[in-house]
Amino acid sequence: MARASARHILVSTEAECQALKDQIAGGADFAALAKEHSQCPSGQQGGELGSFGPGQMVKAFDTVVFSAPIKEVQGPVKTDFGFHLLEVTSRED
């Protein structure tokens, strides 16, 4: 059974999400930005979501987490919760 670990930052607008992605690309720390900006309680842990299997997260999340390259920030990804930046930190297929 596939498993992945990921972290994310959840914000309300696509523009804010893209601005944070640009900051990360420029060298900003993902975890620090998650603590400062994420609207998800996981932000206080640097956006860490822990380990999970397929189907445990919303579809858009699953699609990215189980296909994207590891350690590469993805997004903005839109869900009913808002806009996410996602980073797969590990995956076992």
Image (cartoon, rainbow, N blue to C red):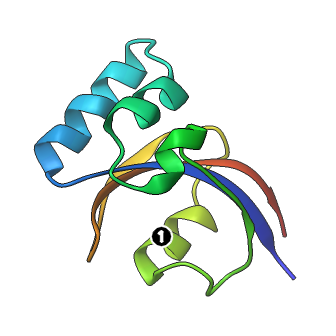
The quarter of the image holding the N terminus is bottom right
- Residue 52 position within the rendered picture, expressed as x and y whole percent measured from the top left: 73, 71
Q: Residue at x 54, y 30 (%)?
A: 31
**For the residue carrying disc 1, how many other residues have a C-alpha within 10 Å: few (<14), some (14-19), or many (20+)?**
some
Q: Residue at x 54, y 74 (%)?
A: 62
Is 1 on the left or on the right of 63, as rendered?
Answer: right
Q: Residue at x 72, y 57 (%)?
A: 5
Instruction: Note whether 23 is above or below 64 in the view shown.
Output: above
Q: Looking at the picture, which amino acid does disc 1 mark?
A: Phe
- Residue 2 position within the rendered picture, expressed as x and y whole percent measured from the top left: 81, 76
Residue bearing the label numbered 1? 61
Helix, strand or loop at label 1? It is helix
Is 26 on the left or on the right of 48, as rendered?
Answer: left
- Residue 92 position within the rendered picture, expressed as x and y whole percent measured from the top left: 86, 63
Is 41 on the left or on the right of 7, as rendered?
Answer: left
- Residue 60 position within the rendered picture, expressed as x and y whole percent measured from the top left: 41, 75
The quarter of the image holding the C terminus is bottom right
